Image (cartoon, helix red, strand yellow):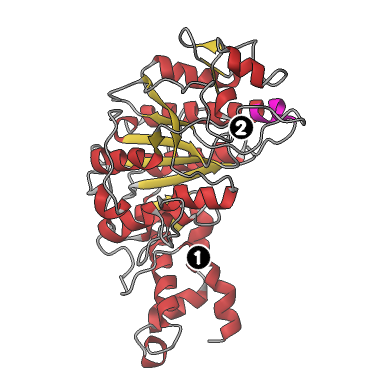
Amino acid sequence: MERRQFLKNSALASSAFMVPSFVKALEGATFRTKGFKRLVIVQLSGGNDGLNTIIPYTNDFYYKARPSLGIAKNIIKINGTLGFHESLEPLQRLYDDGYLSIVNNVGYPNPNRSHFRSMDIWQTASDSNSYLKTGWIGRYLDMHAKKAYNAIEVNETLSLAMKGKHHRGIATKDHRVLYRTGKDPFLSDIAEHYNDAHLSEHNLGYLYKTLIQAKSSAQYIYEKTKIKLGTADYPQHSFGKQLKTTAQFINSGLDTSVYYASLGGFDTHANQQGTQKRLLGIYAEAIEAFVEDLKSQDTFRDTLILTFSEFGRRVAQNAANGTDHGTANNVFILGEDLKTPGFYNELTKLNDLDDNGDIKFEIDFRTIYATVLNKWLEVDDREILNKEFNYLNFI
């Protein structure tokens, strides 16, 4: 078994569940139906402009700060002060059905405006001055999961959020490709001869175990996933495909508690209007199709969808008709039985900004995580977040 061949095939390990002991393929695999709660996390990468997403259309300070970028026409007015961007019409229908809760002014103390650092903070649930090597979902897996497929990111690479100290989720955009990769003769040879002394004592033994576990997960996902034709019409975009695949996994009853998807391109420093309009349309159309897909199989009632971006944008527009990196933002929670549908809280005052001209955060994003962990996934949030946070009342 040549080192070159091992490295060539080790890409599968990057999406595997890092465990210290070998688990046989499909051992203890289960099929989940009604009553099994699932969390779907949607990441809007680049820093979505929350003020032009949920628009304070009666606020003079908003239009003064954004003389050409402020939106005054075609607003979907929700109440007397706030409205949706026109591209969010599909989301408005979910809002009208009571399936959406919007949490405003979400952030964290001493915010960081770097994409990479702020995303790390959101994905690890750390303080802004501390650096963690494990993600908040990864730590959940460390404590409460046994298999790689207990958390799936529908992407080619695995986010830090999904990586724990001992366990991690699995990343795949196409479970059929993952399965074919897992059928590689190299991996079959490892699985067959793993307990041979020359392999189990090899200094790469830990990675061999990882590859075997990835093969096990690939086989489980492939064998359990069923093609169920629905009426949902997903947008022809990679994000729409991610949610369509996620719905297929959920409706097949995979033993998966957490799914992770992402939509990028929100770093709108210049010419923001067209870019954000297009991206918000893709997001809203895909989310509506996703909910319709789940409802058709009666799995939406057991699914909670959380949408976040690593930060919002500056209140004032810049010279390039865009917005620069800001701080607090809105977070969307979608589910069937929300306790507080609609606007969870009011938008902060735009005439009372921080020293940098940014929105002051009101709600620590980790209070949302704590609520989801405790009230939805029903685990001890304190041992995962390493701190105690108050719970919000949206679920």
The residue identified by callout 2 is 314
Q: Residue at x 59, y 23 (%)?
A: 52
Residue 325: where, in percent of width, then height? 62, 39
Q: Residue at x 60, y 33 (%)?
A: 313
Q: Start and end of the magenta stretch?
A: 271-276
Residue 352: where, in percent of width, then height? 51, 24
| Disc ID at residue 14 | 1
Residue 71: where, in percent of width, then height? 64, 16
Q: Secondary structure at mark 2?
A: loop
Q: Earlier in the sequence, mark 2 or mark 1?
A: 1
Left or right: residue 265 versus residue 343 is: right
- Is residue 66 highlighted in magenta? no
Q: Nearer the viewer, residue 209 or 393?
A: 393
Residue found at the very far front of the displayed protein: 355
Quarter occupied by residue 132: bottom left
Which secondary structure class fits the magenta region best? helix
Left or right: residue 16 versus residue 37 is: right
Residue 376: where, in percent of width, then height? 27, 39
Left or right: residue 128 versus residue 142 is: right
